[in-house]
Amino acid sequence: MPPKRVLDPILTLPVPSTVNSVCFVSPLQENYCYDLSKPLVLDDNDGNDDDSDSSDDDDEELIFRSSSLVQKSDDHQYPPSRGHSLTSLHGRFLATCHQDSGEALLWDLQRNKRILTIQTNRGGGGLCVKRTANTSRLVFQTRDNQGTVSLHAIDQQQKQQEEDATSSSIIRQYSTNHQGFCEAAPCAGDEHLIALPCGEETKVKVMDHRASEPVATLSVDGHGMITSLAMIRHPTGERNVMLCCGAEDGSIILHDVTQSSNSATTTTTTSTSTSYSLGKEPVLTVDVTSSQSKNENENEHGTPSFLIGAGLAGDGEEVLELEPSKAGRAVLLKASFAPDRSTLPLLNNTDAFGWTVQQRARLSTCRVDETSYGKPGVGICRFRPDDGRIFAIGGWDYRVRLFERTHGQPLAIIKSTVGGSLSALDWAPDASRSGLLASASRDVNIIHVWKCYGKRYGG
């Protein structure tokens, strides 16, 4: 057996408190902002290719492992991780969301330095930061009394090189009244749309930040509370927007947002939704990307196709009792929607409303057996954003695993030497070229930046 490769992170970044979320951003070089920063209160009652991976992590051919960690945590500048140049981090910025302090911060990765407080504490812990389709904008969500979600623009003025000239301005702020852990979801492929959880935990609203009324409202009944969200506008046309909801009962609910927004009111109907059961544990994370196929982004029948990644909670003892085909805590699926069913032949997996959902792969994490139950749950998953060809999952066992998306074949494991459930994971917007991936664990105030399959893989 060939020796396992070990790759240290290209950057180890100490941070002041527990990290819940990270995202790469690209500050603009000019100032702009809409005067829409007054909070908008949302009213919940408004009317208007296929094999599972069952191998253990210790048997993988390639392991990326962190062998050195910096434990200090303050605002001073730190040297690069040993043996690595920060050339690849020139002009790279990372936003972080902090649970304890309730802040959102911005870091210059080349200088290994905090350069901006995007948002101070507003009365609750930070839940997430997420980049929009406009990479100079991000969404910040907190668990304060109003369940506030704000959209920020990050600007960088050209002044003296030694002077920090980065600023943040609020474009729009929403009071969702959501007190749970479901994270808001900017729409991939559309910088204006965002899916928001609501105070009523079975509802989600889709907002256009340029308007005050929801584009669509989805009420999910019979699946418990909504636990995770992802949304995408398909590149083949303006009318192809899909919302994916993870649910408490282990289901995902897919919804054609464009169809619902064309109705007389903004309240959606069941005719544009479908559900698919992944198991009995809550779906903690979902992500979506467009499907690359014969016609670039459409299936053979001419309808838009999407790939969906999902991660479920999982107690080791309970997972051990499941049959192997259902034991994997991460799932890859392909979905398509044809509102005109004449464009789609009658298939066994096509429902009465034109949805087709197929499971591509069931992905396993750590070994689960009678001697060591392990921690097989998955807390976060992310497709590589610019091409979607690599799927990363962050596990409860403090590892990040990389899979190719077609059949779910394992590519690598990024293995930290410290414990803690993975709480944060984000690819750089140009990750197919740069290979940059950031990760953080819930129990350690440190962020790692890795270079994984840049340029050469999947080009």
Image (cartoon, rainbow, N blue to C red):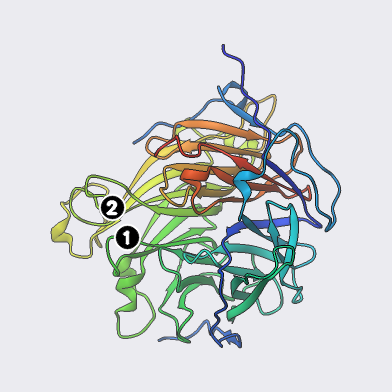
Residue 235's disc number? 1
Residue 78 or 393: which is nearer the viewer?
78
Q: Is residue 24 left or right of residue 142?
A: left
Q: Residue at x 59, y 76 (%)?
A: 199
Q: Is residue 394 above or below residue 61?
A: below
**Whole-percent x, y for residue 114 in the image:** 75, 60
> Is 8 in front, or is 165?
165
196 with respect to 188 (left or right):
right
- Report the disc number at residue 297: 2
Residue 34's place in the image compared with 98, above or below, is below
Which amino acid does the dot numbered 1 rest on? Pro
Count of numbered marks: 2
Q: Is residue 378 visible?
A: no
Dot 2: few (<14), some (14–19), or many (≥20) neighbours within 10 Å? some
* Image coordinates for residue 184, horizontal then vertical, percent: 55, 67
Q: Residues within 10 Å of mark 1 (few under 14, many from 20)?
A: some
